[in-house]
Amino acid sequence: MQDNATEVTAAGIARLAGVGRAAVSNWRRRHTDFPKPVGGTETSPSFALAEVEAWLRKQGKLAEVPLRERVWQQLAGHPEGPLTALVHTGCVLLLIHERPTVWLDASAGSDARLAAILSGALDQVLVPRLGPDVPGVNAGGGAAGVNTGGEAGGVNRAAHAGGVNGGARAGGVNAGAGSPGVNAGAGSPRVNPAVDAVGVNAGAGTGRVNPADTSPAVNASQTPSPVNTPPAIHTPQAVHTAQAAKASSVTPIPQATPALRTPTGPQLLLSAPLLRGAAELAAETGARQAFEFLLGRHLDASPRQYTLTPAELAGLMADLAGPARTVLDPACGTGALLRAVAARPDQELYAQDSAPELAAISALRLALHSRATVRAAAGDTLRADAHPGLRADVVLCHPPFNERNWGHDELAYDPRWEYGFPARTESELAWVQHALARLTDGGTAVLLMPPAAASRRSGRRIRADLLRRGALRAVVALPVGAAPPYNIPLHLWVLRRPDRAPATPEVLLVDTGRFAGEGRGGPDWEAVREAVTDAWGAFTRAGRLAKRPGLARSVPVIDLLDDDVDLAPARHLPPAAVADGAEQLTRVRERLGATLRLTADLTPPPADPSPAARWPLTTIGELARGGALLMSTGGNGGHARVPVLTDHDVLAGTAPSGTLPESEEGAVLTEPGDVVVPVLGGGSVARVIDESTGGAVLGRNLVLLRPDRTALDPWFLAGFLRGTANNRQASSYASTATRLDVRRLQLPRLPLEEQRRYGDRFRALDEFERALRHASRLGEQLVRGMYDGLTDGTVAPD
């Protein structure tokens, strides 16, 4: 009965049977006994998974469904949605990971028995690892809560309470450091879709899923440590008292809620088949790997619903922050940043996210990943901070960008605005000050920021105060394509909560734009990481850094305190290699001349007229069925860190430049002689893999054809696939895109020797095309260098 509750789409049926979606449509038309839709829409119906499997097995179209595919389909088609299914699955996988014998006992018997036992069994694991579900945090009135109070949203007033930040009758700012509610709602782990699969941080920025209306989550810390004992907040008590009086007649501010509540028996009953399947998968791969696989598949299936922090960027941010015992991420998403933190004994990970499901997934993911204490909360961090008493060693954050509704009207008197009240358009500077307020003295915060935050006039006063007081230590400009939005070069801000005023303060400015990759393959992360960490290490040791032209330098704070307080690194760095600019241009010109001569030599000879040939034709689909070639599609990263050949690399004729999240599904590796074809964009392009490109992972939107050399010549195959008429007849058109059906592409049936004659000619055309592209790049480089040299005075006009 429970399997019938799981639904699957036509695309899921195609994956189960190993066919295309068109085949599923044909089955629905041709077979009257095909299962009827049970949900979805008229254009995108869904079907009961159990009925579909039974029909496929009856038709001999389903020999055996791979376990992980079956579990994924159960999760994707869960009646309560995939996020709820992921939370239930994560709870059970944590139970299996921590106490496998408890699971074995609970799972012996019916689904009803399993659901009845599970809820109590999960408490045995969730409470020790994630903290008790403590109500009353952020409570108003007479509660002994934390961060209670009124209109000003960060007034932190507890009317009669002995809690943290108690105002009014509590007798002072931050009264009751040891009282109940201190550090309540400590944090949670972040979930990185890529521990073994994805390695991305979803939901950290805009486009977050299911944002919580108000509530912060509070899993109260059971044993507050001295590290988290809140010092006095840097706002006069009079402000608290006045604001408390004003707040008395206003609706209370949003409340934080626990990130994870133990699912009840009735809730788990609907998930019982999924949970049993997930347990089988964990037995094969391990509990952590099973959760990472399912989370990674969900993120890949819903790319537009999440803002992701790439694993490489998360690692760089963690490196800049350094080792830490207590770490906070106030906009945790799926937990990539906390996942990247190096483990150490007695570590505590705190997290909060406005999307309750993401906060819960992060908590479970981190608990599966490490032995650290995990405290997670769900709620709007700026309006309803779940960790008001926390003083962390490190704060890592990828906040939402360009939010107007961040709480400007409610939070005017919040004590966190130590460096100035942010303008409505400066939500990022509110997150910066929140991070600083949650640091212990000398602690480090690293935030991903939009470049406009470094130069907008509305934020110049706050930037100036951050500089004067030594809080802002470095601004790093990342290459284009480092993180979404991929079309702008984002910044990293490195901040420290001042423990003493610097004598001659300087700020490190780094620009890594030179390491941007071509197309959308992403930057050269190894080069970025080496350049940034080397500059930061030298700067922290000496307090300053000598000029590294075009890359990095430290700038005295006094030099930045002008009318604009512009912190964009590119505006303060000397241009790269100014001294030998003319010599470099000479070398580029020489290379361009040699390439143009080569291009002239490779120019095809005049074409002789010939009557139109009438060959017998075959299709790629027929050749694949006959065994003359193997056909594969890309998109899985596998376990190894291997360069990825993207569709943009194929179109531009460049080296592999992309990355893919790690996954349990094996990657397709290219070999010399393979032919790779992009399926999107409408262009007639096919690329033969050579020795330099062989071994790369096949990226998304690419199809690989591996011909049998005894039947097909690779260059003959690639050349005929590039025919314009051939591509038109094999393409389908939507309102915004063109998709190529590679199986419908046609080839003439020719003897192998004749194929090779054509192949030699196609190879010569490919060399000519490569030479033209190289000449174009060199020409652009020469023109840009001449403009720069003439305008900066390093090249004379004569």
Image (tube, grey):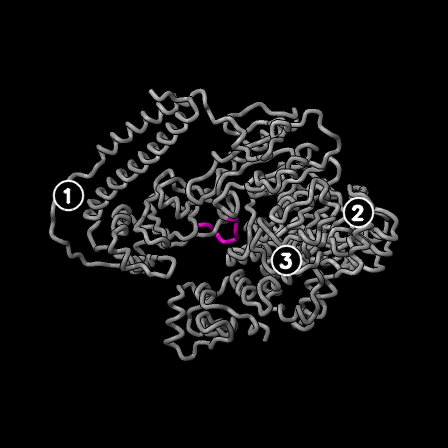
Q: Which callout, 1 or 3, points at the residue further toward the start of the chain?
A: 3
x, y percent for residue 40: 50, 71
Residue at mark 2: 239
Residue 112 sits in quarter: bottom right
Side (left or right) of 584 relative to 729: right
Residue tagged 3:
355
Residue at screen point 60% across, 62% down: 83
In the rendered image, residue 29, in percent from the top left (x then y), is placed at 38, 75
Q: What number is the disc on residue 607?
A: 1
Name the N-terminal-most of marks 1 and 2: 2
Decide whether residue 665 is among the magenta residues. yes
Give the quadrant of the N terminus. Answer: bottom right
Look at the picture and state if 793 lies above or below 510: above
Q: At label 3, which amino acid type do we have?
A: Ala
Instruction: State how far apart marks 1 and 3 are (Cα).
Output: 64 Å
Q: Are marks 1 and 3 in contact (CB under 8 Å)?
A: no
Q: Mark 3: which secondary structure?
A: loop
The amino acid on which the numbered mark 1 sits, given as a three-letter code, is: Ala
